[in-house]
């Protein structure tokens, strides 16, 4: 972090602000922002304004956003003294902060309602004076009316809000949709709330806090509407988004409430235990939500006969569920009373009591996660073992059991089950998928709940496998969920295997956010000796893929490295090479550059040893880009190595990979000058090297375009391989256009204006339907414009 002593003028102030903005939102960012604001006040009013805006934004991203009210009051005073101290950005931020201030006042029961109403009136007056529409002030008046329980006023303002014209001060559409659905839900209409939230749930509208909040708010309405699969998906997908958020603690509570009311008390307890600091949330409304949800969970545990279960709670000590239930209910009631006293209504308390009165909606909603209540819960979360939350299922006769691989031992089996198992053996011998499916279904149906849970778990897992082989992903996933739920009650070894099967099915359906928590629970129970190294390595790799997809690259690297260690001694080293490359990519994106470089060297060696020349080339190129900023000449040598490999294996790789490598080398050793956008070399001789690389790439790609050379095994587009005997014409054309325009740009800066214009014109003729300004015609236009500054090209 830049030393605060270095902040002496506007330039150093802005550098410090930009650096602090790169920190994760939270208390550390706020502390730095406060120091920056103190320094800025000594520089001048304009600097102070800019720093206060940064401080207010920093507060907003914490669990105590109400602390922004003090710096905002200073900002209001500065505006009233001289609006000229605010540039366009600061002016927008100033008016936007009125909305944050209003919502924050509602969260503090010590702020009188009259003061909030006066603030609303001031907000409306200032917005109108500045030429803004009334939509934003109406939205926040609606929030106040809804909070205090004035239904008539809330409905009237709600209608006026949605009818008002949107402008630059309106909340984003995703947040407005969120609030609209909340009102529908408050009015008791689950279906209408879900319809309002649909654009966010579908991914059509997003923002920094959505779909995070709506995924949580939709959970109970979805269950009540019978949309169980969507509710499960939204929980598995949504909780990971907000797990570490200081600001969205109340959203986390909605996930815990959902688990509590759907027969997943063990999951609810695990989530409550993993973040004890939530009990100490700074805002009264958030603490009320935490204690209300905790009371609901504890009372559910008491109903299950577990009132003596030791659980973590506030004040850093363990409580019995009975003790915590009484304490949480008391605290929630006390906090609700503070709001009701301030508001002069019973609305907040009524909502709290409604939550406390809720009862389970379903006996058990299968989540694929741990379903067993522990004997004791540590602050790190629930652990497996102990008492179940579900009956194991009547007498354990007939004793029909099966292990993870599906072998059966026949004891006193009912005739229908015995016959079904006989047909199953025959179908397996004949590899008859329809026969296997029919026999497994009949055996499960006839055995019912009198069979042991372990047998039922294994049969569901086998049926899931058969359905997957038949291409029926949805029913295969359903039976995997069933297998996990049953295996949890009997056999952790089988449960871990079932979770891996479930995760694989979810990933195949592009549902990585749902697969991630399933894998997180599976991996600690996996053992290479019992499950096999393949399953363990796959679980780590899949979880790494899930983390990488959501941008958690350090977490992804950890999982890839764990899988890499398992595959080091395998006879087939292709998997080891693939994992080393994935680890290198993740380490690089996580900023762990020296480790990433070592991983790339390892991957390069492995790909070379197994004869995967295309991957060998890609690893060399990726390594070059990684070290470009620190050692450009070494990076250039790596690209030369990649080129050499391409040239030695052109018969296998094809022309396209060589052309792409030459193109990347030219890009690697140049950069665009910030003054005029033209390329310059990064070391002596680099520009000349880039010209030769780009020219050669263009010649090769042109030959491919004209049919004079074949792409052979693959050609690359956007950095990815397109496998196949023949690359598509569009892919080849794109490769040529990229190489031609780079060659043209480099020709332009080295005096070859005629060649630059000629190449640009060639590309324009190849893309006649592309709108002006779009790639590649926009690039062509820039080249022609720059060429015009150098003087006209010859016809």
Image (spheres, rainbow, N blue to C red):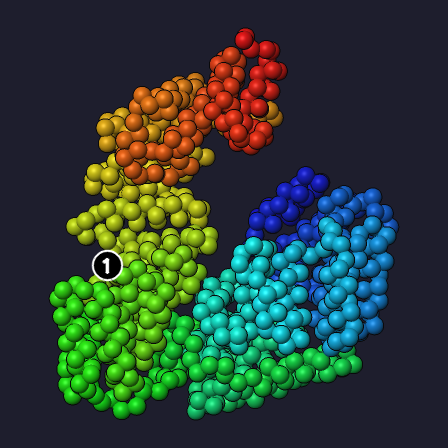
Count of numbered circles on the image: 1
Query: Percent x, y for residue 526?
Result: 28, 67
Residue 641 makes an appearance in the image: no
Question: Residue shown at 37%/39% (left/top)?
Answer: 720
Instruction: Say above or below: 132 vs 467.
Output: above
Residue 552 makes an appearance in the image: yes
Instruction: Say above or below: 793 vs 196.
Output: above
Q: Residues within 10 Å of mark 1 (few under 14, many from 20)?
A: few
Question: Residue shown at 65%/71% (left/top)?
Answer: 184
Instruction: Say above or below: 651 vs 51.
Output: above
In this view of the protein, which residue sits in the foreground, 462 or 339? 462
Instruction: Say above or below: 316 vs 583.
Output: below
Helix, strand, or loop for circle 1? helix
Work out which quarter of the rendered image holds the C terminus and state it.
Answer: top right
Examine the image and state in which quarter residue 473 appears.
bottom left
Query: Percent x, y for residue 442?
Result: 25, 77
In this view of the protein, which residue sits in the foreground, 489 or 224? 224
Q: Mark 1 = which residue? A: 534
Query: Percent x, y for residue 27?
Result: 60, 60
Give the residue at the far top of this rendering: 794
On the rendered structure, is 213 left or right of 433?
right
On the rendered structure, is 26 left or right of 365?
right
Question: Residue shown at 84%/54% (left/top)?
Answer: 128
Question: Residue shown at 24%/42% (left/top)?
Answer: 606
Examine the image and state in which quarter residue 534 appears.
bottom left
In this view of the protein, which residue sits in the foreground, 179 or 674? 179
On the rendered structure, is 412 left or right of 715?
left
């Amino acid at each position: 972090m830049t030393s605060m002593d270095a902040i002496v003028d506007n330039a150093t102030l802005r550098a410090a602000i930009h650096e602090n903005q790169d920190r994760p939102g939270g208390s550390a960012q706020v502390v730095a922002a406060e120091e920056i604001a103190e320094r800025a006040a000594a520089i001048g009013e304009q600097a102070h304004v800019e720093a206060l805006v940064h401080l207010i934004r920093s507060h907003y991203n914490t669990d105590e956003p109400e602390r922004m009210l003090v710096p905002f009051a200073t900002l209001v005073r500065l505006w009233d003294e001289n609006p000229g101290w605010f540039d366009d950005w600061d002016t927008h931020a100033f008016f936007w902060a009125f909305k944050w201030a209003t919502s924050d006042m509602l969260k503090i029961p010590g702020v009188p309602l009259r003061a909030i109403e006066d603030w609303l009136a001031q907000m409306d007056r200032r917005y109108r004076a500045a030429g803004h529409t009334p939509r934003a002030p109406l939205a926040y008046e609606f929030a106040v009316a809804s909070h205090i329980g004035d239904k008539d006023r809330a409905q009237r303002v709600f209608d006026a809000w949605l009818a008002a014209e949107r402008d630059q001060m309106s909340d984003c559409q995703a947040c407005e949709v969120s609030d609209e659905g909340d009102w529908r839900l408050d009015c008791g209409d689950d279906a209408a709330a879900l319809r309002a939230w649909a654009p966010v749930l579908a991914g059509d509208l997003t923002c920094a806090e959505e779909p995070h909040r709506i995924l949580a708010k939709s959970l109970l309405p979805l269950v009540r509407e019978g949309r169980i699969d969507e509710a499960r998906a939204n929980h598995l997908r949504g909780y990971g988004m907000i797990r570490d958020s200081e600001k969205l603690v109340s959203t986390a509570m909605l996930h815990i409430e959902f688990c509590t009311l759907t027969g997943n008390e063990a999951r609810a307890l695990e989530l409550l235990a993993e973040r004890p600091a939530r009990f100490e949330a700074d805002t009264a409304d958030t603490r009320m939500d935490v204690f209300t949800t905790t009371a609901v969970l504890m009372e559910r545990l008491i109903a299950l006969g577990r009132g003596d279960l030791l659980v973590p709670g506030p004040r850093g000590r363990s409580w019995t569920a009975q003790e915590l239930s009484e304490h949480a209910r008391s605290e929630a009631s006390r906090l609700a009373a503070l709001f009701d006293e301030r508001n002069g209504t019973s609305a907040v308390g009524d909502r709290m009591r409604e939550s406390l009165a809720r009862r389970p909606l379903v006996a058990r909603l299968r989540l694929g996660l741990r379903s067993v209540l522990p004997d004791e819960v540590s602050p790190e979360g629930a652990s497996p073992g102990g008492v179940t939350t579900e009956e194991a299922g009547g007498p354990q006769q007939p004793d029909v059991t099966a292990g993870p691989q599906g072998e059966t031992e026949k004891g006193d089996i009912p005739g229908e089950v015995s016959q079904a198992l006989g047909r199953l053996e025959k179908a397996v011998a004949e590899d008859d998928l329809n026969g296997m499916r029919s026999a497994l279904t009949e055996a499960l149906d006839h055995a019912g709940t009198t069979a042991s849970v372990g047998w039922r778990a294994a049969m569901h897992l086998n049926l899931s496998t058969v359905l997957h082989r038949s291409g029926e992903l949805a029913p295969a996933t359903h039976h995997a969920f069933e297998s996990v739920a049953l295996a949890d009650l009997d056999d952790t070894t089988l449960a871990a295997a079932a979770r891996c099967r479930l995760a694989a099915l979810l990933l195949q359906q592009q549902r990585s956010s749902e697969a991630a928590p399933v894998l997180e629970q599976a991996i600690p129970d996996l053992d290479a000796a019992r499950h096999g190294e393949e399953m363990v390595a796959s679980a780590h790799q899949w979880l790494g893929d899930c983390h990488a997809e959501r941008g958690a690259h350090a977490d992804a690297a950890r999982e890839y490295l764990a899988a890499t260690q398992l595959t080091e001694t395998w006879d087939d080293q292709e998997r080891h090479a693939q994992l080393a490359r994935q680890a290198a990519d993740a380490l690089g994106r996580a900023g762990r550059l020296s480790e990433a470089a070592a991983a790339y060297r390892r991957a390069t060696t492995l790909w070379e040893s197994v004869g995967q020349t295309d991957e060998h080339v890609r690893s060399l190129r990726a390594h070059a880009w990684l070290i470009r900023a620190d050692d450009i000449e070494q990076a250039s040598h790596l690209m030369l190595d990649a080129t050499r490999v391409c040239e030695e294996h052109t018969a296998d790789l094809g022309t396209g990979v060589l052309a792409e490598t030459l193109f990347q080398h030219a890009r690697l050793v140049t950069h665009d000058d910030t003054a005029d956008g033209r390329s310059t070399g990064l070391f002596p001789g680099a520009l000349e090297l880039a010209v030769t690389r780009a020219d050669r790439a263009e010649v090769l790609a042109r030959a491919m375009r004209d049919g004079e050379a074949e792409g052979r095994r693959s050609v690359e587009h956007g950095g990815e391989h397109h496998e196949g005997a023949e690359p598509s014409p569009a892919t080849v054309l794109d490769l040529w256009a990229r190489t031609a325009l780079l060659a043209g740009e480099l020709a332009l800066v080295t005096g070859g204006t005629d060649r630059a214009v000629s190449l640009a014109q060639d590309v324009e003729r190849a893309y006649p339907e592309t709108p002006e300004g779009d790639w590649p015609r926009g690039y062509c236009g820039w080249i022609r414009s720059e060429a015009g500054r150098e003087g006209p090209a010859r016809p």
